[in-house]
Every structure is written in structure tokens, then in C-alpha cells.
Amino acid sequence: MTLSASDLGFEYAPRRVLSSVSLAAQPGTRTAIIGPNGSGKSTLLRLLAGNLVPGSGRVTLGGTAVASLSPVRRARSIAVVPQSVTLAFPFSVSRFVGFGRHTLGRRGIERAIAQSLERVGLANRADDPLGELSQGQQQRASIARALCQLSGMPTEARYLLADEPTASLDPAHDLLVRDLIAQLASEGVGVVAALHDLAAAAAFDHVLLLGPKGRPIAQGPASEVITREPLERAFGAGFRTHTDEAGAVVAVSASRLP
């Protein structure tokens, strides 16, 4: 069941945020959305999740407009990891993670919570207040909440939409989350992530590069998109890619244009 965007346009009047954006995500694949600040990456994820209604174009899941689905129906197919977590009450980490299943039933929820916390390395913090965790730990708790939700979904259509999922993480946990995303894809989950880390995006199956005002610059396999010319057009800086012996991009460096 494909999650797709067709010729999307959106504005926070009078500012245009996205222009003529199309994207098709499939179960079991990883799609990266990259681009400069203000290019509409987060807005595109919110449109894919059905939290915003497009100004033009459509977002569909299996041919049905996502924004027309009930919150419960969306929760059965789409889990979201936002950039940051804000809670008004001092919930424990385990209770926060369990919120991922609140519309999907409580059957097996305790096991799902425990497994989700184990996968992100937070099993020892389950009973602590979420607010006592560091920013990076809260980010991992947010990922665990999405994992808990995914565990209760029907297997034919599961998507994870993640906004900068590794932004606040130290190197070890950055690698943990990267590996986790690859594992989820191998389990049939379609992953769509907005990323600033271009080397991390290079490991994804498909990359959409947005430029100023949310205009698509390039789209396709990472090996075709994360290259000097399209990156320079999008970011207005010079770029060099650094590869390993197998030709895979392991680092991307930027410099001032002449």
C-alpha cells in the first residue's frame, strides 16, 4: 500500500513552503527528504501524516486521501516521530511510550513497551519521569513510542515518518537509530525521514532533495541525488562527497563557493 504525494503545494500565507512536490514511499523502503532550512521538509512530513491539508495536490495511502482518514485509521498505518517532545504532565517514560498504542488497543501493550524501550536502549529508564531525560534520551523515547505503535499495526501497511530522528543523539546512539531504521525497513516498514545529515541520507534507498521555497531539485537513488551539482543548487555552497572502497558515500563536506 503506497503512501504518495502528488504535485503538492502548500503555503503559510503569504509564504510559499512547497511547490509541485511528488513522492511515493513503499513498504520496506527508506526515503530521505533533504534540503536547506526552510525548504519544507517538516511541512511535507506533516502533510504525509495527514496533519495538514494540501493547498494543492493530494496525499494518499493506497489511493485514499490521508487527510480524509479518521485519526484512528491513520494511527493504524502511520507513526510519527516529531523533532521534539512537549508534555504538560510528568508522565513516566513507559507511560509515554505506551501512548503509541492508545488508539490500537491494550492487548500485549506491556510487552510492546518493554521491547520498544529495549530497542532504543532505554529499558533502565522506564519508570523515570520523561522530563528528567536528556534531549537525546527524550528523542529515543519518542522513537520508542513510534515503535510501540508500529507493533500494533496491521502488517500490510506500516509507515514511520521521522523528523530529524538523530539530530540530538551522540555518535553511538546515532548509529543505533540508523541501524534501527534499516531493521524496520527489513521488517516491511516504510520509513520516510527528514534529515540534515547528508551522509546518513546516502544510506537510504531513495532521496528527495528540496530547494528554496520547497521546490524539488532532484529525486531518485542516493547515488544520483547526493552529488555535487544538485547539492550546490539546493544549498548554495560547494560540496565534496567522500566514499569508501565500495563507492558508498560515508561523508559529505561543504565549502564556500568561489
Image (spheres, grey):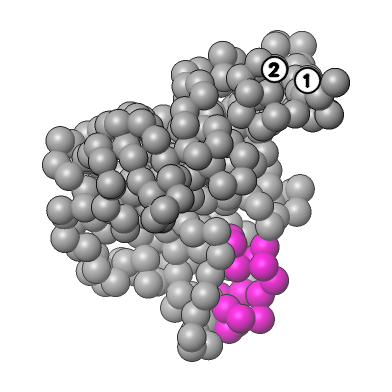
Cβ atoms at labels 1 and 2 below 8 Å apart: yes
Residue 1 lies in quadrant: top left
Amino acid on which disc 1 is placed:
Arg
Which residue does the image show at 44% across and 78% down from the upper left?
Answer: 95
Element under label 1?
A: strand
- For the record, the magenta segment spans 125-140
In this rendering, the answer to whether 150 lies above or below 200 is below
Work out whether residue 39 or residue 118 is closer to the camera in this orientation and state it: 39
Which residue does the image show at 35% across and 46% down from the upper left?
Answer: 10
* Alpha carbons under labels 1 and 2: distance apart: 6 Å
Residue 109 lies in quadrant: bottom left
Q: Which mark is residue 181?
A: none
Work out whether residue 61 or residue 94 is closer to the camera in this orientation and state it: 61
Q: Is residue 138 magenta?
A: yes
**Picture mark count:** 2
In this rendering, the answer to whether 115 lies above or below 188 is below
Q: Is residue 207 visible?
A: no
Which residue does the image show at 45% across and 50% down from the upper left?
Answer: 15
Residue 188 lies in quadrant: top left
Q: Is residue 52 visible?
A: yes
Identify the residue under disc 1. 240
Element under label 2?
A: helix
> Outermost residue toward the front?
14
Residue 175: horizontal and vertical position, in percent? 68, 43
Work out whether residue 35 or residue 156 is closer to the camera in this orientation and state it: 35
Query: Would you call the spot at circle 2 few (<14 residues within 10 Å), some (14-19), or many (20 or more)?
Result: some
Q: Which mark is residue 228?
A: 2
